[in-house]
Image (tube, rainbow, N blue to C red):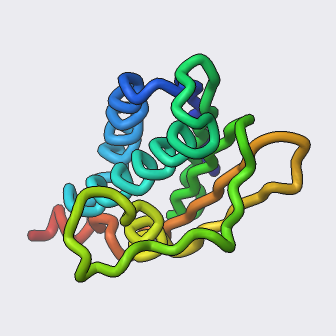
């Protein structure tokens, strides 16, 4: 049975921690490895940061809607904004040899998540959908109890 949690935060970087804590609590329920939990939180954090920086151009009085669903061991996150629509053809992560802060968010998102899609077929804003199959990472309670 699918379980969903929805959260709406202001487009202010100070509130990213609220979303991060919510996500970490959700993932704790599924006993995922700490490393994977951190990676998923990084993806969501980067995506929300990009919404603030590019979609809302740094304006902090807008909203970001985030929903988390886990169904049949597949984690799905939808991030919806109502700002400037993104042009995915311009997404080019910088060269990894160019060591400096920034510019790697979409690289990490695409490397960590199993699927990433952007819907800009709306009057305003973008809907980002990211999924990750959790099954290979979940603790098998029977094996855990036998150990």
Query: Where residue 36 appears, x then y in whole percent?
Result: 29, 62
Residue at screen point 44% across, 73% down: 93
Residue at screen point 80% across, 55% down: 120
In the rendered image, the vertical position of residue 88 relative to residue 80, given as above or below = below
Query: Where residue 122 appears, x then y in whole percent?
Result: 88, 48
View extreme (top): residue: 61
Residue 74 location, quadrant: bottom right
Q: Is residue 126 left or right of residue 98?
A: right
Residue 135 makes an appearance in the image: no
Quarter placement of the C terminus: bottom left
Q: Is residue 87 left or right of residue 30?
A: right
Q: Nearer the viewer, residue 32 or 88?
A: 88
> How many numbered tags mark residues here?
0
Residue at screen point 41% across, 56% down: 43
Residue 31 makes an appearance in the image: yes
In the rendered image, the vertical position of residue 118 relative to residue 61, given as above or below = below
Residue at screen point 46% across, 24% down: 12
């Amino acid at each position: 049975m699918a379980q969903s949690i929805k959260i709406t935060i202001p487009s202010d970087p100070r509130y990213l921690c609220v979303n991060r804590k919510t996500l970490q609590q959700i993932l704790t329920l599924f006993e995922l490895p700490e490393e994977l939990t951190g990676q998923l939180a990084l993806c969501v954090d980067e995506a929300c940061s990009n919404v603030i920086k590019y979609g809302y151009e740094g304006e902090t009085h807008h909203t970001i809607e985030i929903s988390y669903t886990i169904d049949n061991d597949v984690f799905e996150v939808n991030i919806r904004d109502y700002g400037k629509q993104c042009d995915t053809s311009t997404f080019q992560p910088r060269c990894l040899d160019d060591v400096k802060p920034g510019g790697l968010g979409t690289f990490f998102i695409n490397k960590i998540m199993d699927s990433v899609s952007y819907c800009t077929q709306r009057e305003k804003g973008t809907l980002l959908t990211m999924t990750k199959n959790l099954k290979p990472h979940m603790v098998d309670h029977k094996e855990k109890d036998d150990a």
